[in-house]
Amino acid sequence: MTTRFPCTPGLPRRRLACLAAIALVGGGAGLATTGAVFAADVYPSKPITVIVPYPPGGSNDVFARIMAKEMGEVLKQPVIIDNRPGASGTTGTGTASCPLRDDAGSDDGL
């Protein structure tokens, strides 16, 4: 039986965890190798939240905080670490997989 998150009906838990890991590693490698930013507008315009699916003080938390400090300096935006421990990382991964609502300008009735 495959466990699925309510907001990701088509992705099993293992595939979702792999995608999250690839995004974290790929995003860090991209920031480390990029020398110039080619953007018309200031991006990101809001604080960045990094969800760590493990408790504070562990190696994952320390790594995320080091990455957040570097990201904040490069992007000139605050980076917030949000630790969501529980269920061997499933709680934090489920939180990261659900999109945030941006209520500004949305009138779709949801």
Image (cartoon, helix red, strand yellow):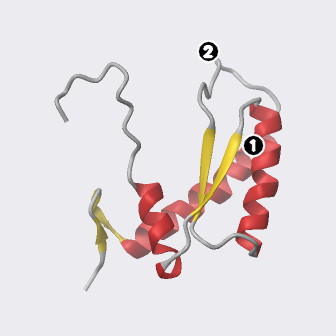
Q: Which class describes the residues within 10 Å of circle 2: few (<14), some (14-19), or many (20+)?
A: few
Q: Which class describes the residues within 10 Å of circle 1: few (<14), some (14-19), or many (20+)?
A: some
Q: Quarter-wise, where is residue 3 in the image?
A: bottom left
The mark found on residue 31 in the picture is 1
Q: Quarter-wise, where is residue 60 in the image?
A: bottom right
Residue visible at 51% across and 77% down? Answer: 86
Judge by depth and name the residue closer to the eye, 28 or 5: 5
Quadrant that contains the C terminus: top left
Q: Disc 1 residue type?
A: Leu
Distance in Å between CA atoms under marks 1 and 2 = 18 Å
Q: Where is residue 97 drawn, in percent x and y?
A: 42, 56
Q: Residue furthest left?
A: 109
User: As displayed, is residue 108 above or below residue 4?
Assistant: above
Q: Quarter-wise, where is residue 83 in the image?
A: bottom right
Q: Disc 2 residue type?
A: Asp
Judge by depth and name the residue closer to the eye, 67 or 21: 67
Observer-side mark, 1 or 2, equals 2
